[in-house]
Image: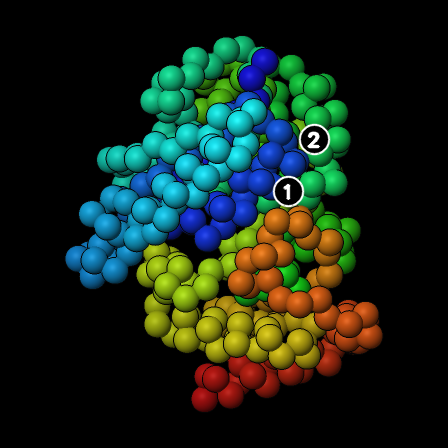
Amino acid sequence: MKKIVIAPIFNDTHLVKLQIPNIIKSINPDYILYNEGMFPSGPESTTNVDNDFVNKYTLDGKRGFDYEELQDVISDAQKKYKDTKIMLNPMEYTSTDAPTNYYHGCNNFSDFGIEIEEGDLIFPYEGDVFHHEDDADTIKEACNKLEPNQGLKTIWVDFIVNQYYAEEKTLKPFFKAETGRQRRFVIKYGTEDYYRNVLMNFMTQKYDMLEDLEMITYHYAWFRPGKYAEMRLAQLNRDPQYWNFFLSSIARVPQFKYKRIRVRPNPPLDPKLTHAWIRFCDFDHPEDIKSHPNYVEPLSDYLVDKIITQEETLWLKTSYSFLNIYQT
């Protein structure tokens, strides 16, 4: 039985260099495989990849602008972690469908000289996800119980700007005792049809075929400094009003005053719609992410408690006031 982590990535070097040691500590796989390349229509199949995008964010229309640094990161990791085979493949995608590209970016094992066999554990990753090193035993025990054509999904928490704010809809298991966001974590390979079926839910994120693993996947979706943040805005096809509101809203995050911040302007203006908000949270994070530029110095216990214990209604009023000012 082989343990294989495989991930399609594009301009993720700032995270990948921290992700590799995190993968070693939490999963300890035999292989870490990275397929680097741009999805022709982006991660949501809607990116306008024009000449301006290509010139700003790629080296040659396919490789990311940080590809040369990525090569150095992989080379250094290969020398440091000799018990794990760490490989980089320049990927060329042809489809304009993001799920199809994700599937191909997690299924080209032959390009790495690897033959997949029944019983292999495959972890279809993304370049911005981490797992806590303290969950290594939990991961090992859960994987040992799987049979071929079975897999696990975890609780995904999407962090915004720094480690103290996350998408409220992904925090529902922690403050509302409701199901939040769950996505694939590991598949024990049995048949190609089962594996493909799981991966093709990249956009729908419907994983009824997978069992629950009560463990957090730390998704640092908006840990993107400088040019990486600019590229993210260009990748996601939203109108200017949306981005103006979003950027104005997340500018309030470093103030550490608010329990909830509305980051999406779209109606209806219902405070119960958790997808419109980000929410303050206080988790113990994986050790390796703590050297990322978006990870801030820990707040005092006093300030954390002050924010967490705020009344919900107070921040609803504040957010509505901000929304009204913006719209006028």
* Quarter the N terminus occupies: top right
Count the marks.
2
The structure residue drawn at horizontal position 50% and vertical position 59%, both measured from the top left corner, is 222
Residue 240 seen in the figure: yes
Residue 144, x across and y down, in percent: 70, 19
Three-letter residue code for mark 1: His
Residue 191, x across and y down, in percent: 49, 14
- Residue picked out by circle 2: 139
Q: Residues within 10 Å of mark 2 (few under 14, many from 20)?
A: some
Residue 31, x across and y down, in percent: 51, 25
Residue that sits furthest to the front in the current view: 79
Callouts 1 and 2 close, C-beta under 8 Å: yes
- Residue picked out by circle 1: 131
Q: What element carries label 1?
A: loop
Horizontal side of 206 relative to 46 (left or right) equals right
Q: Which of marks 1 and 2 is nearer the N terminus?
A: 1
Horizontal side of 40 relative to 159 (left or right) equals left
